[in-house]
């Protein structure tokens, strides 16, 4: 771990090697861009105003904004120059900021004083379905073992267009949705609160470089279009979803809310954690082929915390299990000429691993309600109950360096009256 003059605990999510970007406010500061370092948040707007950043040639204060989009729009060389600059001035041997305590007071804010906000304005949201284990589990439950994967699944990264307006940041509670379900196939549908509220353990990447309508992005160029990643809880009302999804796919069972972690970890910070993906058989079409390592070794964890009780870990998975990687997802998304915009969010699909303790949704963990999970207070869960809080964490770890995402934590409230 590179030493900073700011104290950074050994197991911190946010060492100098990480430096994730986010948007925060405090009791006295308006929303602005920040970077996490140890238990501190670096106020990039104040740092910009101090003049210390002048050497980077950024012509206006893109950090004094509600969202990171304008900063992201300056392009990858600028993201990288800000990252390198921060690694330099917060290095333990660098005096430029360290020796100016009055300035430090304005720029370095204790993390407990900030409230994190949505990091980006999400233009469009796409959700993939890229975990073979998850697709297989769901397929077995709904179609049986013989037809678990649909014929297209190993030939293209299946996805759908989701709803951007209802993506919220960690800490914002969501209400249980109400709607139509058909619990008994022999009876007409009924209306009421969802009885099968579920989470989906996912990660999302944020588009950092747009394209023109008609353009396609190759698997080789894809990672240049990605600004960074967040943990993503793609909430699902399974009973609404089951009744509505034929033939056009997910709608009200999905679009009432998705929750994201507030810190965007950059692809530069994640680069040391690249790893091989699963072997793809049958061979994919040329536009989906790729070379090099395109998967990432990111540990994932899900906890459920009933009101007034301790959290219990219900899943431990890993981003590396994904059959389709982000480069392939982007190549597929754009092969027809669909354009990308800065701030678009693309989620992985539920990330389930090969073992039961690595499944990424309650649908799978409690296997359609047949295997209830024990909570710390003695109660059981097959789906999420009112006032439960779901916490998802993600981190990479290697050779004493931890690149953490922090968490996305959301409480489910009863149906809104
Ligand atoms: Ca999903």
Image (tube, rainbow, N blue to C red):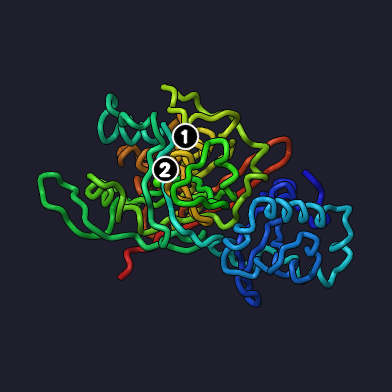
Q: Residue at left 40%, top 34%?
A: 156
414 to the left or right of 293? left
Residue 385 spot, x, y in % from top left: 36, 55
- Seen in the image, is 84 located left or right of residue 33? right
Point out residue 113 in the picture as x, y percentages from the top left corner: 66, 68
* Dot 2: element: strand
- Name the one closer to the observer, 237 or 245: 245
Residue 78 picture location, percent across and down: 69, 55
Q: Residue at x 69, y 36 (%)?
A: 398
Q: Residue 359 appears in which quarter of the rendering?
A: top left
Who is closer to the viewer here, 168 or 345? Answer: 345
Instruction: Identify the residue at horizontal 47%, vertical 34% (top origin).
Output: 324
Check the picture and name the quadrant holding the C terminus.
bottom left
Which quadrant, please, contains the N terminus? Answer: top right
The residue at which mark 2 appears reads as 128
| Whether residue 392 can be seen here | no
Closer to the camera in the image, 316 or 17: 17
Residue extending farthest top: 282
Is the Cβ of the residue at disc 2 closer than 8 Å to that at disc 1? yes
Residue of label 1 = 324
Q: Is mark 2 within 8 Å of ligand 1?
A: yes
Q: Residue furthest bottom?
A: 28
Work out whether 258 lies above or below 291: below
Chain-order first, disc 2 or disc 1: 2
Above or below, comparing residue 24 to residue 154 in the picture: below
Q: Is residue 216 visible?
A: yes
Disc 1 element: loop
């Amino acid at each position: 771990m590179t030493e900073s003059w700011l104290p950074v605990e050994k197991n911190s999510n946010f060492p100098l090697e990480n430096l994730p970007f986010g948007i925060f406010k405090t009791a006295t500061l308006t929303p602005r861009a920040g970077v996490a370092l140890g238990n501190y948040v670096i106020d990039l707007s104040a740092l910009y105003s101090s003049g210390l950043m002048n050497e980077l040639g950024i012509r206006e204060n893109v950090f004094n904004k509600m969202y990171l989009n304008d900063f992201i729009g300056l392009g990858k060389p600028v993201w990288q120059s800000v990252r390198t600059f921060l690694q330099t001035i917060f290095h333990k041997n660098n005096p430029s900021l360290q020796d100016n305590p009055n300035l430090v007071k304005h720029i370095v804010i204790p993390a407990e004083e900030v409230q994190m906000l949505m990091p980006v304005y999400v233009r469009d949201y796409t959700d993939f379905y890229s975990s073979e284990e998850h697709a297989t589990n769901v397929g077995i439950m709904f179609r049986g073992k013989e037809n678990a994967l649909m014929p297209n699944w190993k030939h293209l990264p299946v996805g759908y267009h989701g709803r951007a307006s209802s993506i919220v940041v960690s800490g914002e509670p969501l209400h249980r949705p109400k709607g139509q379900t058909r619990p008994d196939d022999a009876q007409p549908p009924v209306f009421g609160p969802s009885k099968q509220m579920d989470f989906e353990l996912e990660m999302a990447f944020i588009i950092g470089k747009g394209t023109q309508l008609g353009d396609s992005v190759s698997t080789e160029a894809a990672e240049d279009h990605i600004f960074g990643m967040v943990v993503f809880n793609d909430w699902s009302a399974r009973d609404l979803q089951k009744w509505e999804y034929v033939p056009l796919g997910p709608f009200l069972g999905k679009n009432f809310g998705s929750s994201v972690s507030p810190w965007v970890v950059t692809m530069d910070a994640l680069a040391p954690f690249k790893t091989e993906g699963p072997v793809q058989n049958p061979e994919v079409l040329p536009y989906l082929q790729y070379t090099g390592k395109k998967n990432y070794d990111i540990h994932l964890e899900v906890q459920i915390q009933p009101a007034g009780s301790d959290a219990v870990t219900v899943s431990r998975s890993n981003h590396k299990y994904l059959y389709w990687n982000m480069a392939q997802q982007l190549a597929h998304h754009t092969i027809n000429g669909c354009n990308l915009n800065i701030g678009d969010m693309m989620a992985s699909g539920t990330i389930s691993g090969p073992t039961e303790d690595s499944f990424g949704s309650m649908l799978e963990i409690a296997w359609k309600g047949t295997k209830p999970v024990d909570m710390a207070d003695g109660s059981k869960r097959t789906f999420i109950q009112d006032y439960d809080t779901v916490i998802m964490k993600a981190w990479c770890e290697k050779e004493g360096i931890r690149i953490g995402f922090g968490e996305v934590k959301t409480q489910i409230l009863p149906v809104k009256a």
